[in-house]
Image: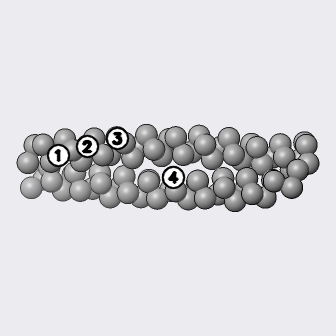
């Protein structure tokens, strides 16, 4: 049971790292959207906005998965 718990905790840490990385990437993409739209106009602004939104949704999915994994770890500790 112990190796299984360690594997789940490692997976949880990885999900948290992925979430942080994706949120940082989404913020960079959003700033690129703002720069392309309002400072130096370029038609690529809408593409960056869509990409930033997609990355944010992916980060949200990782948050949901990490919450479910955390619940699974807590349930295994109780049993």
Mark identifier at residue 59:
4
Q: Secondary structure at mark 2?
A: helix
Whichever of labels 4 and 3 marks the residue nearer the N terminus, that label is 3
Q: Residue at x 44, y 54 (%)?
A: 62
Q: Which residue is mark 2?
A: 9
Mark identifier at residue 5:
1
Q: CA distance from mark 2 to mark 3?
A: 6 Å
Discs 2, 3 touching: Cβ within 8 Å = yes
Q: Secondary structure at mark 1?
A: helix
Q: Secondary structure at mark 4?
A: helix
Quadrant for residue 39, please give it. Answer: top right
Q: CA distance from mark 1 to mark 3?
A: 12 Å
Discs 1, 2 touching: Cβ within 8 Å = yes
Mark identifier at residue 45:
none
Q: CA distance from mark 4 to mark 2?
A: 19 Å
Quadrant for residue 65, please give it. Answer: bottom left
Q: CA distance from mark 1 to mark 4?
A: 24 Å
Provide residue 38's location: percent of width, then percent of height.
89, 47
In the drawing, does residue 59 fall left or right of residue 38? left
């Amino acid at each position: 049971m112990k190796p299984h718990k360690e594997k789940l905790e490692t997976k949880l840490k990885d999900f948290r790292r992925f979430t942080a990385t994706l949120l940082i990437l989404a913020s960079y993409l959003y700033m690129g959207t703002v720069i392309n739209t309002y400072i130096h106009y370029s038609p690529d602004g809408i593409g960056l906005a869509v990409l930033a939104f997609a990355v944010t949704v992916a980060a949200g999915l990782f948050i949901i998965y990490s919450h479910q994994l955390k619940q699974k770890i807590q349930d295994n500790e109780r049993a």
